[in-house]
Amino acid sequence: SFMDVAPGMTVIVQHDFQIGEKRDKDWWGGMSIQCGGAARDPSIHNLFQIADVDTGEIRWVNADLVSHIVTAP
């Protein structure tokens, strides 16, 4: 679950389309850089800063958009 995401982990994220953005993908892969806590309980991560592995773009992502944590074989 998204509660287990920590910096350095590779994750799969549901694509959250921005206004004017072409709808050409459903998901993207990224590496977690930073985990942000909720105001009431900082131990619960509700935002993640994730670097897109394809483009290098860094995005803040809501925790509910993280669908999978990629583990090493």
Image: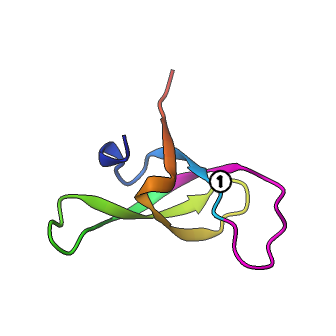
Return the residue at label 1. Answer: 53
Classify 34 as above or below 64.
below
Task: Find residue 15 and report its horizontal and vertical position in percent.
Answer: 65, 57
Classify 11 as above or below 60.
above
Give the extent of the magenta segment: 17-31
Q: Quadrant of residue 47?
A: bottom left
Q: Write the residue at 22% across / 58% down.
A: 44
Classify 72 as above or below 27.
above
Compared across the picture, whether 42 is left or right of 12 comes to: left
User: Would residue 20 be counted in the magenta stretch?
Assistant: yes
At label 1, counting other C-alpha atoms closer than 10 Å, the crowd grade (few under 14, some 14-19, many 20 or more) is some
Compared across the picture, whether 58 is left or right of 66 comes to: right
22 or 60: which is nearer to us? 22
Residue ranking furthest to the top: 73
Q: Write the residue at 84% across / 56% down.
A: 24
Q: Write the residue at 42% across / 50% down.
A: 8
Classify 31 as above or below 1.
below
User: Would residue 29 be counted in the magenta stretch?
Assistant: yes
